[in-house]
Each structure stands twice: as C-alpha cells, then as structure tokens.
Image (cartoon, coloured by chain):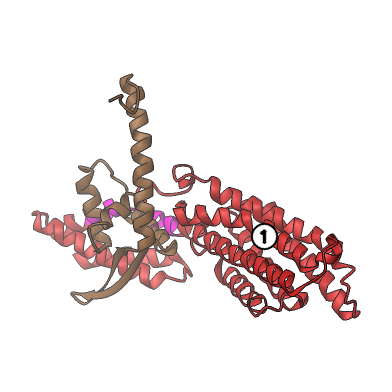
Amino acid sequence: MLLLAVLADGPKHGYAVIAELHNRSNQVLDLPDGTVYPALHRLLRAGLLASDWTTVNGRRRRVYRLTPNGRTALLEQHQTWQGFSGAIQSVLKGVPWPKPS
Amino acid sequence: MAQAELIDRYLVTLQRSLGKAPDANDILAEVEDHLREATAAYRRDGLDAHDAETRTLQIFGSPKLVARAFADARKKKGIAMPTTFTRRAGLAAMACPLALVAGMLLLDPERWTAKRWTTNWYFAANSTILIALALLIAAMLGLRARHGGALGSVGLAGFVLTAVGALPVLLQVSWALPFWLIPISAGCALFALGLLRARLFSRLAATLFGGGLLLTAALALRDALVGDEQNVTVWPYGFLGIAIFGLGLTWLGWQLRAERPIQSSQGMAPAA
C-alpha cells in the first residue's frame, strides 16, 4: 500500500520511490533500500504497477507508474487501513469508534 | 579504493548471487542506477567519494540479502490485493454452476418433465448455458487477476481454451455436447493446474474444479462415439461431473469472495 501511495502522485524511478518513502515516513521506515525493489517487482507482476525504461546519463532507468488496478487497490487498502487504525486508536484511547455525533 | 570500484564489485557479486534469474540484467541495471544516484546525492551532501559509496552500499543491503529478496518475491504466488473485481468474480464463480445445471436440464425437458421439446426450450437452454459460460469466464478472469500472473502460460492456455469452447454455444449449437464440453473441460483442467501450482487457494477446490467437467465431457464423448443420440450416459451420470466441477468452483468463488484486504496481505513486504 505504501509503495502504491508513493506512486499515486505520478511516475517515479526506484530511487525516487524509496527517497519519497523515507521522507514521508520521516525516516521511520528504514528498510534496506535493496529490499524495496523486489516488492516493486511483485506489484509489477500483479498488474498494479507498470514500468517504462528510459536512459539517463547513459544508464538504463526503470520508471514505475500506477495502473488503474493499482489505483483501485490503493483506494481499497487505504479505506481498510483507515478503518483498522481507527479501531486501534479508539481501543487505545478508550473511546467508542466511530465517535457518536 | 576508487569509487567506481566499490559499486562495480558490488554489482559483480550481486550478479553472481542472482544466478540464472530471468530478469537479472534488468535488476542489475536498476540497482546500478540506484547506487549511482544515491552516491551522487551523498556527494552533494558533502561526503567524499569513498564514504558516499560506502554509505550507499550499507543502506542498500548486502548482495546476498537483495538477491534472496528477489528470489523470495519470485516464489511468492499471487499478490495480496483482492479488489472489488476479484470479489465480484467470486460471486460469478458461485453462480456459474447453478446456471450450468439449469441450462443442462433445460436442454432436454422431456427427460425431466412432461413438457414437449420445443425450439423455445432449446433457446432458453442455450441462453442459460451461455450465461453460465460467461460467468465461468468472469470467474477465471478474477482468479487470474487475484493470482497476479502466477498462473503462468498454463493458466492462460486454460483460459483461452475455455473461451474458445464457449463459441459453439454462442453459435447456438449447445446440443452438440462434445463440441463445447471437451474444450471447456480441458481449459478448466489446465486452468486448475495453474491454480494448483500457484498454491494460493484450496488445492482440493482446484482439483474438483479441474476434474469435474472432464468426467462429463468423457461421458458425452462416449455417447457421441457409440452413436447414442439419447445421451444415456451423460444423463444423469454427467451431472455427477458437473456437481464436482460446481463444488470446486463454488469453493474457489467463496474463497475469492471472502477475502478481505487486511487478511490478504500475507507475504507482502511491509513497504508494499
């Protein structure tokens, strides 16, 4: 979900995806950078991401983008996560959830 | 040690660790782009060449760790992302056997009711079977999407064969059972083979789904070969095959339908 969310703003290459992940999480998500690429490849194989190759400074660069299926999956996972985190928050705070209006 | 040498040595070690991975060249190109860019960013932050490269490689992870992560990702079947589409496909999978049984019953009303066979009965039967096959194709599309390509060429071949098998019914010749039952049963069997190899859903369900229609198709072929126009073997024994197929497909449909995104994140890396 996090990788999909980072790519929701537009296409990015792997380094930019990982940098954005670090920035948005304020460096809390501190996985070895190299382990993020296999996750990106899985999302590619799942059809949730697509990629294009370009050449930058003489190097081949893969640029990832969300597919329509990826956007749908992101929306669904986001909603599920919001429900889940809301429930956890209300348990921790000892208040009913959703809050009565 | 020169800057390029550290990264180059890392890439050589990674190449060895990747072994005969089919996408090794693409992985190496992608990793190299990352390492060069990260190093350049550290240089801009004031590190010297050696420190920048050392820091980049430390954060990236050892070649062995990265190669193992790619190998694990390749082994993992499917993707933990049920979507609205895959869950709707689950409904289609559960509805398909009911429509197929109804269509088969309508195909020969004189055997089951006192009603005389008419072209209207035949039209109703053909249309109902066509609906069942449309539901079957929708279910297969959902299963294929849910497996994220893990069904491979075997699954694709099964899907194509099933779609081709639906053509005779589309052309209103559902009375010729072997013409459509044989390719469709073979298609389902191939598709089930892909499901079995993917190991995402129940293997028993996949086996029932793949094997059931083969029985019915074999009986229909037997009747056709001996010139039995009354299809005495297909009726009623062929329904046993349809029931087995229906049980398997309903089971798979139930699994597709019951999945929730939070439960389906099994095997996903936290960052994904």
As drawn, the chain in brown is: A
Q: Secondary structure at mark 1?
A: helix
Residue A5: percent from the left, percent from the top? 29, 52
Residue drawn where x is 25% and y is 75% of the image: A54
Q: Which chain is red?
A: B
Chain name for mark 1: B
* Magenta stretch holds residue B86: no
Please identify the quarter of the rendering in which residue B30 is found: bottom left
Quadrant into which the N terminus of chain B falls: bottom left
Tell me which residue sits at (61%, 57%) in the image.
B93
Q: How many badges with numbers are in the image? A: 1
Q: Is residue B2 visible?
A: no
A79 lies above or below B118: above
Picture quadrant of residue B118: bottom right
Residue extending farthest to the top is: A94
State whether the magenta stretch is mostly helix, strand or loop. Answer: helix
For the record, the magenta segment spans B54-70
Q: Is residue B240 visible?
A: yes
Q: Nearer the viewer, residue B31 or B146?
A: B146
Asked if A60 appears above or below B213 in the picture, the reply is below
Q: Which residue is mark 1?
A: B99
Q: Is residue A51 above or below residue B139?
A: below
Residue B62 part of the magenta segment: yes
Image location (x, y in percent) of residue A66: 32, 62
Residue B216 percent coordinates (x, y):
79, 66
Q: Amino acid type of disc 1?
A: Ala
